[in-house]
Image (spheres, rainbow, N blue to C red):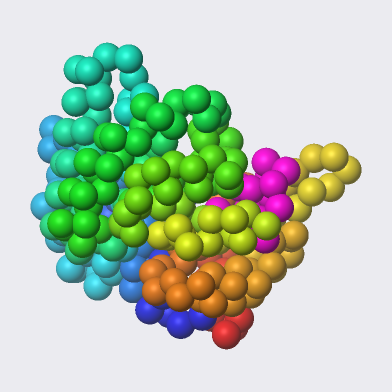
Amino acid sequence: MDLCRLTTCTYPLREREPEYSFRLFADVGFTKLDLWGNPPHFSADPAECDHAALESFSARYGIAIANLGSYPGAKFASDSPEEVETALQEMRDTLDLAARFGSRSIRFRPGEAEDPAIIERLVEPFRVSARYAEERGVFLGMENHKGSIAGNPDWCVELCEAVGSKHFGVLYEPCNLLHAGVDYRNALATFGEWVTHVHVKDGRVRDGGFERCHLGEGDVDAKWVFDNVEALGYTGDYALEYEICDLEPIETGLKKWLDYALGTA
């Protein structure tokens, strides 16, 4: 995989000020990062986040903000029209900032329930959001994860087809799918045409439990992921999501992940 296609997530450094992530990731060798979507790293609310400071860090360390790991869309299935409108404004504000930062994509939440019955209520606000995103040249992705419909590949497709926009789709997360007991290869076959962003980490199922591990040491075949997503015609980024700080500090471990990913080509 080429360096220009690789980013890394600030989530494991969420307790540090954002500048630390920009500086560390630039020192490791990255030219892009995925910004975690809560303070102190990001908020669409200027009272909670200094957006100009983020731009200055990006310029100072030569590392672009490729994706916003944000959370708009959680309230789109609300019974309250006021809550839905507030959520739409949060979505618009987040997309405006993504365009301002030059980010290719943002993450969103498809409601707050693992229940396909909410899909009907999600469709219209996400159609509005997708049109707004397309106008700004930004892609929307729901991350495969327990706790929402995005953990079920068939439900992902149902929502994507109903919204019907190429700027709306799935943030493909093979390790999260593995953790949830879903075959990540079959999942890609199900929703592959809707992939808008990709997270890469590793984990393994052992003795009925799940444990995270270094990239290349678990049950996620990163080369398979890169090769098969590329075969779909995907032109976006791959974010290395280092979530094993309890095994090795990110300051030393992340370089190993970058070297591994670069060696998969």
Query: Which quadrant holds residue 111?
Result: top left
Residue at 80% x, 40% y: name it.
Answer: 209
Q: In the picture provided, is 176 more to the left or to the right than 66?
A: right
Is residue 167 or residue 210 the one in the foreground? Answer: 167
Q: Position of residue 60 (x, y in %)?
A: 19, 68
Highlighted magenta segment, given as a residue range: 173-185
Q: Position of residue 150 (x, y in %)?
A: 51, 41
Is residue 188 or residue 260 the one in the foreground? Answer: 188
Q: Check the picture and name the quadrant holding the C terminus.
A: bottom right
In the depicted structure, whether residue 17 falls above or below residue 56: above
> Residue 183: within the magenta?
yes
Q: Hey, which residue is sitting farthest right in the picture?
A: 207
> Residue 180: within the magenta?
yes
Q: Position of residue 151 (x, y in %)?
A: 57, 41
Q: Main secondary structure of the magenta part?
A: helix
In the depicted structure, whether residue 209 falls above or below residue 263: above
Taking the image as drawn, is residue 81 in sight? yes
In the depicted structure, whether residue 242 falls above or below residue 25: above
Q: In the picture provided, is 255 more to the left or to the right than 26?
A: right
Taking the image as drawn, is residue 39 in sight? no
Residue at 36% x, 32% y: name it.
Answer: 122
Q: In the picture provided, is 43 more to the left or to the right than 151?
A: left
Residue at 59% x, 73% y: name it.
Answer: 228
